[in-house]
Image (cartoon, rainbow, N blue to C red):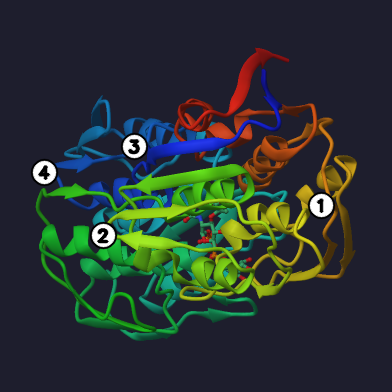
Amino acid sequence: MEKLVVTGGAELNGSISVSGSKNASLPILAATLLTREPCTIRRVPDVSDTNYMLQILRSLGAEVERASGTVTVCAENIHADAPYDLVRKMRASICVMGPLLARLLEARVSLPGGCVIGDRPVDLHLKGLAELGADVSVAGGDIIIKAENGLHGKRVHLFGKHGPTVLGTDNLIMAATLAKGTTIIEEAACEPEVTDLVEFLNRMGAKIHGAGTRTITIEGVGQLHGADHTVIPDRIEAGTFVIAAAMAGKKVTVRRARAEHLESLFTVLRESGYKIDVDGDRITTGRIDNPTGCELITEPYPGFPTDMQAQLTSLFATVPGISVVTEKIFPQRFMHVAELNRMGANIQLEGATAIIKGVKKLSGAPVMASDLRASAALVLAGLCADGETEINRLYHIDRGYEHIDEKLMELGANMRREKA
Ligand code: EPU
């Protein structure tokens, strides 16, 4: 196991480039199961979650090649059983269910277990697939899903207690591409990663309209063919670097970003007083003298993303005044709070709301990463804390950030990986 030791106080300066999106890559890689023909996916980030997905595709029978960011998948002969040992490592493995069902009319995928960011059910995925005509049962910890009479298009509402579901929408779209007739998904997720998946599917010959809105229409087609696709830039990685710049940057430019995907973050930062300059795919920002605290609520896109809540909480920890952060997507996603408090932050949790009283300075401490975004928040805190912050369980951050330490060091950050 590795840990990251961050020595705070170095001023970040310069520019860094954003990698391809992890959360777009995962369903797009799963979608290659929908055709017997080879597909090429470009700018797939080299992170452990995409590597797990490639292992799952191989274990299902696909031939997979990877040369730096370009992945070629040929799923000519595949079977329907996703192995527990791989699936349990990553909840997003659930998104092979839709394509397997569409292509083979059956799938067996382990039921995802508990998760540190809270209860993460898959009821909406199953409800959607059942409405298209699939029979769902659970045996031996696996979801067994079969559509002996084929899948048939229908109008399906996918709204849950906490809003729409991203991977649930993906699963249903993928299943509907090869169904008979037209499927209309109401209350679909409209995250940019869903839109990117739909672009790829349409390149494969699918007929999908309305991606990026709450209503998505899929006209089923007889078969899909191979396609070539470049994954969108990772908006959460870009946002994390923008926050790093706001916390510890002189002048930092984040390159290869899609600024239009980050509007909700810019709104919060500008409200706090930060100046954000956008020039094409480049975003430039830095620290300011008198930021002010503010209020934010996580919401489905285009609202403020839950995947950036921990990093913003880390920023607010040293912003003068009181900030209030409410988590509406995953109400228990606050594992970073206790760790930030160990570094001298003053954050109190009231249910799904964090009340943050900005302190002058954080102080370095040994801390424990609990999930991907929480670990990013601790790295950010370490950048501007006094002394050394030791972030343990680094594998969490390697699940979703491509070489984050190397990229931050390019900007002048002082950090090193060590054996824990
Ligand atoms: N939900 C249900 N029933 C379901 C599915 C979801 O009640 O069947 C609830 C969830 O418990 C949650 C809300 O609906 O309260 C939204 O969850 P969603 O299904 O949208 O999450 P997801 O698709 O499993 C993706 C991202 C997450 C991101 C969420 C929300 C991927 C691989 N994962 O998860 O990313 O937080 O959408 O935007 O795309 C991360 O990258 O760190 C990460 C956790």
Residue 96: give x, y in percent of width and height: 39, 50
Is the shortest distance between ligand 1 and the CB of mark 1 under 8 Å? no
- Residue 370 image offset from top left, x and y in percent: 73, 41
Observer-side mark, 2 or 4, equals: 2
Q: Residues within 10 Å of mark 3 (few under 14, many from 20)?
A: many
Please tell me which residue lies in front, 272 or 400.
272
Callout 4 amino acid: Glu
- Tell me which label, 1 or 3, sits earlier in the chain: 3
Quarter-wise, where is residue 339 in the image?
top right
Q: Residue at x 27, y 32 (%)?
A: 69
Q: Which mark is residue 57?
A: 3
The amino acid type, in three-letter code, at marker 1 is Val
Q: Nearer the viewer, residue 183 or 70?
A: 70
Q: Amino acid at mark 2?
A: Gly
Image location of residue 144, percent across then percent down: 49, 55
Residue on which disc 1 sits: 337
Q: Count residues near mark 1 (Cα–Cα under 10 Å), then give few for <14, some for 14-19, many for 20+.
A: many
The reply, left or right, for residue 45 in relation to residue 75 is: right
Residues at discs 4 and 1 in contact (Cβ within 8 Å)? no
Distance Cα–Cα, label 4 vs label 3: 14 Å
